[in-house]
Amino acid sequence: MHLKGLSAALLAATLIAPVAFAGPVNVNSADAKTLARELDGIGLSKAQAIVDYRNANGPFKGPSDLARVKGLGQKTVERNKPNLLFESAKPAAAAG
C-alpha cells in the first residue's frame, strides 16, 4: 500500500511539473531574451521590437504603451497582462 501511494504521488508530480508559469517580467528593464522566454506569444523578434521601442521612446507606463509596439497586438498584451510589470528601470549603482 505504501508503494501505491508513492507511485500515485510520483505520477501526480510528473503530470504537474511540466506546467510552467511565466513569472512577472519588468518590460522596462528586461532584455529581449528574457521577454521572449517569459511572455506568451512573444518571440525573439517581437521582444527585440519591445526593447527597441523602449530605447527610442522611454519606459512603458502601462499595457496601452506596450500595445503601441509594431507587431504587438492588443490580444497579446491582454493575454500577458498578469505577467507584466512596468517599473522604472533603475540606473546601475556607481562603484564605491
Image (cartoon, rainbow, N blue to C red):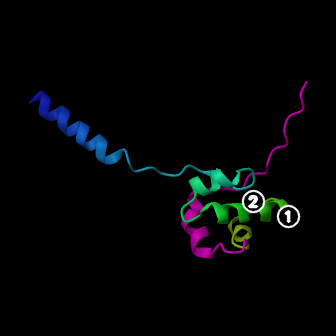
Q: Is residue 58 visible?
A: no
User: Please, what is the three-letter code of the amino acid marked with disc 1?
Assistant: Ala
Residue at point 45%, 49% (across, down): 20
- Quarter of the view holding residue 90: top right
Contact (Cβ within 8 Å) of mark 2 with mark 1: no
Q: Which mark is residue 56?
A: 1
Secondary structure of the residue carrying tag 1 is helix
User: Residue 69's x, y, as percent?
Assistant: 72, 71
Residue at point 58%, 70% (across, down): 76
User: How many C-alpha atoms fall within 10 Å of the one at disc 2: few (<14), some, or many (≥20)?
Assistant: many
Residue at point 75%, 54% (across, down): 28
Return the residue found at the far front: 45
Q: Find out whether residue 7 is within the magenta segment.
A: no
Q: Return the residue at label 2.
A: 51
Is 36 on the left or on the right of 93, as rendered? Answer: left
Q: Which mark is residue 88?
A: none
Residue at point 59%, 62% (across, down): 43
How many angstroms separate mark 2 from mark 1 (CA)?
9 Å
User: Please, what is the three-letter code of the amino acid marked with disc 2?
Assistant: Val
Residue 76 against residue 14 in the figure, above or below: below
Q: Is residue 55 visible?
A: yes
> Quick one: 84 or 14, which is closer to the camera?
14
Provide the residue span drawn in magenta.
69-96
Return the residue found at the far left: 1
User: How many C-alpha atoms fall within 10 Å of the one at disc 1: few (<14), some, or many (≥20)?
Assistant: few
User: Residue 3's x, y, as percent?
Assistant: 13, 30
In the rendered image, which quarter contains the N terminus? top left
In the rendered image, which quarter contains the C terminus? top right
User: Residue 45's x, y, as percent?
Assistant: 66, 64
Q: Find out whether residue 88 is within the magenta segment.
A: yes
User: Residue 57's x, y, as percent?
Assistant: 85, 65
